[in-house]
Image: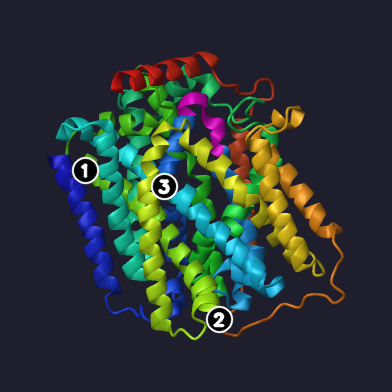
């Protein structure tokens, strides 16, 4: 009861504070609603970036992968820092120089309106059918595991999943649809403080238990008992083989941090370039430390509760079960559950707000009502936000049949990640490539990656890691764009004076420090004599438990 009270208290508290701080904001203008009035500071941007990225698909998904295979999956966190440096130093100045509200607007300027619309559609489809359902599902899975909702209310696992998904979805919709980007960013900042504190508390408590009160002794014992789970270089069959770090891993992170509308919208709302760069690089520093929050708990869960987690048939249950045991049933567990829901809401409402922005500015105003005023544009965004939220809430429960949820989302995202990052990079770096080449490359890249992913090639190509598929599809698509006849004149970028474009004085020093830290974290755990391979025994035990659970429920 105390845990439930703490949960309700924290969640309602964030809602009330967000409403209080945004009550007088201008939500009637498209700039005020979609870009927070271009008033976001570095700290707010950093908090919003981290909360948009750090949700239960990371906490649950990466902890689940770490439970199964160890620390090498931290590559998803650590290597993201290099893409964030690129965003701060290269992409962000060019975005703000053009005064755009969405990244596809750059594609319209660089290519044409049809290219922009195709990419906007890909973004919206990805948010609706992949990202938002995954966020809702992992959030519900985590909350149900922490509070044991089925037992608490004497309902089935499936019923509990539906109820929790719809509860989170409806609450997230309130933030995103009626508050706009500033409400999203402020709630992100409040939740961010709680998530960093609570997220660090879980591994600290775990090490405290292992070391019987001594954190250092606990970490040493954890490493000594599980040496194979503290190797950063993954083998060929691992979740992240070491050689994929330089192919698909780099490209996926560049897509996510440099072109993904849900992420870039946070920095496009910066009050000036310097604040945007500060926010991105501060977030990059925090991202390098992310494995402490999203990876280490999975290894602690393996050490303390392996049999209980394996019995569920889902490695993704590692984080909820660890939290449930470490925090007991007091008010602290409730408060932390509220923080986790805040992380879910952040990712969910960020996706909704970004999808609404893409529809309103990319479709409604361009195709349906060209003379629409700001009130009508904002209203259209709210309506499409409601529709997309309902679709995501209906799809999310179906993910209960999937395996590793983090692997699922990364593989499926590639269907639209590949064409998007290809045309962005080639469009930035080559001033003569044509709009027709961009359209053909988008279709080819998406189809080729999909065929590889779903096993259409019964050759060596059908047996390589999906991150290599990403790199191969990117290389072929880029080559295809360059093969097409080129425009006679070079593309000349437009410019606006809407913002102060003076860069941050310490951007290069901060970027260098972040890069050195990222490399150091990875090198410390590198083992040249041994790479990580998945445990076939563990995989078999999880599959058997999952089969038994499914048979029993039927």
For residue 133, which numbered disc appears in the image?
Answer: 3
Quadrant containing the C terminus in the rendered view: top left
SS class, disc 2: loop
Question: Where does residue 35 sit, x and y in percent of width and height?
Answer: 46, 73
Question: Where does residue 503 sit, x and y in percent of width and height?
Answer: 61, 73
Q: Nearer the viewer, residue 86 or 493?
A: 493
For residue 499, which numbered disc appears in the image?
Answer: 2
Q: Nearer the viewer, residue 516 or 532?
A: 532
Q: CA distance from mark 1 to mark 2?
A: 43 Å
Q: Is residue 24 left or right of residue 493?
A: left
| Rendered image coloring scheme | rainbow
SS class, disc 1: helix
Q: Quadrant of residue 188?
A: bottom left
Q: Is residue 227 visible?
A: yes
Establish if 10 lies above or below 69: below
Disc 2 and disc 3 in contact, CB within 8 angstroms: no
The mark that comes first in sequence, 2 or 3, is: 3
The mark that comes first in sequence, 1 or 2, is: 1
For residue 97, which numbered disc appears in the image?
Answer: none
Q: Nearer the viewer, residue 229 or 393?
A: 393
Q: Is residue 509 visible?
A: no
For residue 334, which numbered disc appears in the image?
Answer: 1
Q: Nearer the viewer, residue 67 or 293?
A: 67
* Residue at image point 57% right, 63% down: 120
Establish if 153 lies above or below 381: above
- Looking at the rendering, the stretch of residues picked out in magenta corresponds to 66-74
Q: Is residue 99 magenta?
A: no
Q: CA distance from mark 1 to mark 3?
A: 24 Å
Q: Quadrant of residue 383?
A: bottom left
| Mark 2 neighbour class, 10 Å CA radius: few under 14, some 14 to 19, many 20 or more | some
Q: Is residue 292 left or right of residue 524?
A: left
């Amino acid at each position: 009861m105390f845990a439930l009270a703490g949960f309700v208290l924290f969640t309602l508290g964030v809602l009330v504070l967000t409403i209080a701080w945004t009550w007088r904001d201008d939500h009637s203008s498209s700039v005020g609603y979609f870009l927070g009035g271009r008033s976001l500071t570095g700290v707010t941007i950093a908090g919003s970036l981290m909360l948009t990225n750090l949700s239960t698909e990371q906490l649950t998904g990466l902890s689940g992968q770490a439970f199964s295979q160890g620390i090498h999956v931290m590559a998803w966190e650590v290597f993201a820092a290099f893409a964030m440096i690129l965003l701060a130093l290269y992409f962000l100045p060019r975005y703000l120089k053009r005064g755009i509200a969405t990244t596809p607007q750059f594609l319209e300027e660089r290519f044409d309106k049809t290219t922009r619309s195709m990419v906007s559609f890909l973004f919206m489809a990805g948010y609706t059918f992949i990202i938002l359902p995954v966020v809702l599902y992992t959030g519900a899975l985590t909350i149900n595991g922490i509070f044991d909702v089925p037992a608490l209310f004497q309902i089935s696992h499936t019923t509990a999943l539906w109820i929790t998904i719809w509860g989170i979805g409806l609450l997230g919709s309130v933030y995103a649809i009626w508050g706009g980007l500033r409400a999203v960013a402020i709630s992100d900042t409040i939740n961010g403080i709680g998530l960093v504190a609570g997220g660090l508390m879980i591994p600290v408590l775990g090490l405290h238990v292992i070391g019987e009160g001594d954190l250092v002794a606990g970490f040493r014992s954890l490493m000594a008992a599980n040496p194979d789970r503290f190797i950063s270089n993954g083998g060929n069959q691992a979740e992240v083989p070491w050689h994929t770090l330089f192919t698909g891993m780099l490209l996926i992170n560049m897509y996510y941090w440099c072109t993904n509308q849900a992420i870039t919208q946070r920095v496009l709302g910066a009050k000036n370039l310097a604040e945007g760069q500060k926010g991105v690089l501060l977030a990059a520093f925090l991202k390098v430390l992310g494995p402490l929050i999203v990876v280490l708990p999975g290894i602690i869960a393996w050490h303390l509760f392996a049999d209980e987690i394996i019995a569920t048939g889902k490695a993704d249950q590692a984080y909820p079960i660890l939290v449930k045991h470490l925090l007991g049933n007091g008010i602290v567990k409730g408060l932390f559950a509220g923080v986790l829901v805040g992380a879910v809401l952040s990712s969910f409402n960020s996706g909704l707000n970004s999808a609404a922005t893409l529809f309103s500015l990319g479709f409604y105003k361009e195709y349906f009502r060209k003379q629409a005023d700001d009130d009508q544009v904002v209203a259209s965004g709210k309506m499409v936000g409601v529709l997309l939220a309902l679709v995501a809430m209906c799809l999310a429960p179906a993910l209960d049949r999937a395996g590793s949820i983090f692997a699922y989302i990364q593989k499926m995202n590639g269907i639209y990640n590949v064409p998007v990052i290809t045309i962005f990079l080639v469009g930035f770096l080559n001033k003569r490539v044509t709009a027709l080449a961009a359209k053909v490359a988008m279709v080819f890249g998406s189809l080729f990656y999909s065929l590889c992913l779903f096993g259409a090639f019964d050759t060596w190509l059908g047996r390589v890691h999906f991150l290599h598929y990403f790199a191969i599809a990117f290389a072929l698509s880029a080559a295809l764009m360059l093969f097409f006849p080129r425009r006679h004149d070079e593309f000349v970028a437009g410019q606006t004076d809407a913002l102060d474009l003076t860069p941050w004085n310490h951007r290069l020093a901060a970027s260098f420090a972040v890069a050195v830290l990222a490399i150091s974290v990875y090198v410390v755990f590198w083992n040249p004599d041994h790479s990580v391979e998945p445990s076939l025994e563990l995989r078999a035990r999880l599959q058997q438990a999952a089969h038994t659970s499914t048979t029993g429920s039927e």
